[in-house]
Image: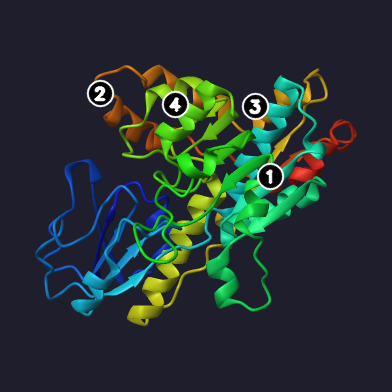
Amino acid sequence: MIKVIADQNLYRLKEFLPDEVDLTTYDPAEGLPDTSGYQALLIRTVSKLNPETFPKLPSSLTFVGTASSGSDHVDKEYLKSHNIQFADALGNNSRAVAEYVMTALLIWREEKGKKLEELTYGVIGVGHAGSAVANILHDFGLKTVLYDPPRAKRNPDFVSASIKDVLNCDVLTFHTPYLESGESATRYWLDKEKLSGRNFELIINAARGGIIDEAAVYSAMKSGSVKDVIIDVWDNEPDFNPNLASLAFIATPHNAGHSEQSKLNASKMICEKLCSFFGLTFPPTEGLYSVKELNPAHLKYSLTDWLLKLHPIKEYDAALRDLAHRPDKTTLFAKLRTDRPYRYEYGFIKLDEEFLNGFEELKKLGVKSI
């Protein structure tokens, strides 16, 4: 029997584990648990794991996994030095993030009268999420400039745009990991210097807090050189910046990648790696991915109405703004991430064919006909 202790918010985790696993859960709001006697620990990004937060690693612990795409909250070298295998769920939410970006762009177009096809889109970071964003922008016929020098070094088939070309774009959307230092450091990548002398229609950050210098972006918005911001991740999160939130076109509580399917993906991916490490048989899980059918024949919705019905991005935005000046906003920010039901990705939604034919954008997003 393999004893596993896991964050209680990992979605439907038990259904992805074989009978040979004895599962215990913990509340991350109470800090990291005592892992004595456990062989595996499964966490989320809210749990920071390093020598300061987790100084005593029991000899029983041999596997740590994060059910998230990013892993900057884990000191991987620290685990390696104690012979602990680390695993992540890289790419689990890439489609969900891409849909967040495209949904926000369409709402921005509808509410502000923008012509998306006349703009250029700089995608900074072209890994799993950035590639998914580039693909969905391509599906809408939008011009992209792909910037990822580290990927170009790893993969000779990928050619990165120059920094000059990407900073000449009208819209920047960020999808890099958060790296404090080194040649590929991304902390405050978008800073006062890069903003100086340039004008941007829109800045989007759905990657990691700290990749954009929020004070510099705020100043650029006040001066008019940055017209709009869509922001899902925050420096010093969960203590988000209420001043930037107040100016943002859309401000959400780090849930761009939250969908029914991405959460299933995260649990599935980390449990597959756990089973492989311990030599266990991974259980069948295909039936967990369901499709939602809607028959809206009697409804007279606009495109914006339907986008907001299928993707509650503005509900998240309103909920975040409601917290801006609350003394307990950091606690409530965390609750917003865990207490709301997950949306379905567009590819898992079906609408009546006759109705769907009136909304080409929904088809491009992946909605299918009944």
Res 244 label: 4
* Rendered image quadrant of residue 333: top left
Could you tell me how far apart the alpha carbons at marks 3 and 1 are, in whole angstroms? 28 Å
Kindly identify the residue that appears in the image at 36 percent across and 20 percent down: 323
Residue that badge 3 annotates:
308
Identified by mark 1, the residue type is Cys
* Rendered image quadrant of residue 99: top right
Under circle 3, the secondary element is helix
The answer to whether residue 170 is left or right of residue 333 is right
Residue that badge 2 annotates:
328
The answer to whether residue 252 is left or right of residue 58 is right
Lower position in the chain sequence, tag 2 or tag 1: 1
Callout 3 touching callout 4 (CB < 8 Å): no
Place of residue 265 in the rendered image (x, y in percent of width and height, measured from the top left): 51, 58
Residue that badge 1 annotates:
169
Q: Is residue 280 visible?
A: no
Lower position in the chain sequence, tag 1 or tag 4: 1
The answer to whether residue 197 is left or right of residue 216 is right
